[in-house]
Image (spheres, rainbow, N blue to C red):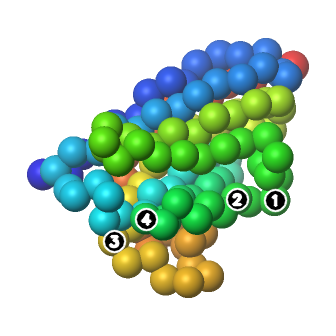
Amino acid sequence: QVQLVESGGGLVQAGGSLKLSCAASGLTFRDYAMGWFRQAPGKEREFVAAIRRSRATYYTDSVKGRFTISRDNAKNTVYLQMNSLKPEDAAVYYCAAAYELQLGAFSAEAQYDYWGQGTQVTVSS
């Protein structure tokens, strides 16, 4: 079955960096768009970044210029490099896979077919 396993979360001081990884198995990774979402306590899950098969990328405004999404199809892995972290970036980060990611719909959770269990990111001020 399809599995998405996130790693790389942890505790970091504000201004620091973390790199999240999401290893996929059970699917043809190169055929899927991949996304990162996050959910802070008491808040709804929100879109962070996505990368298409073509490697086109999308970001929510609050992380543009600080976060970078990338993929390594040979390793079936998607990454999220997070720099200049802020306390408001603290959340559980989830990766997700979408086989058919419609144009303009990259931030919609319903577009994604599979989800990981999440990895915790904590940012101290």
Q: Are marks 2 and 1 in contact (CB under 8 Å)?
A: yes
Could you say whether the residue bearing mark 1 is in a helix, strand or loop?
helix
Disc 3 residue type (three-letter):
Tyr
Disc 4 residue type (three-letter):
Arg
Q: Are marks 2 and 3 in contact (CB under 8 Å)?
A: no
**Left or right: 58 with respect to 102?**
right
Residue identifier under label 2: 59
Distance between the alpha carbons at the discs numbered 4 and 2: 16 Å
Label of residue 53 in the image? 4
**Left or right: 112 with respect to 15?**
left
Q: Position of residue 46 (x, y in %)?
A: 63, 58
**Left or right: 36 with respect to 63?**
left
> Along the polypeptide, which appears first: circle 4 or circle 1?
4
> Along the polypeptide, which appears first: circle 1 or circle 3?
1
The mark lying in front, picked from 4 and 3, is 4
Residue identifier under label 1: 61
Which of the two residues, 42 or 46, is positioned nearer the viewer here?
Answer: 46
Which residue is located at x 53 percent, y 32 percent? 20
Q: Position of residue 49 (x, y in %)?
A: 62, 55
* Residue 120 shows in the view: no
Label of residue 99 in the image? 3
Disc 1 residue type (three-letter):
Asp
Say few, some or many: other residues with alpha carbon within 10 Å of mark 1 (under 14 / 14 to 19 / 20 or more).
few
On screen, 14 above or below 35? above
Distance between the alpha carbons at the discs numbered 4 and 3: 9 Å
Q: Position of residue 21 (x, y in %)?
A: 46, 34
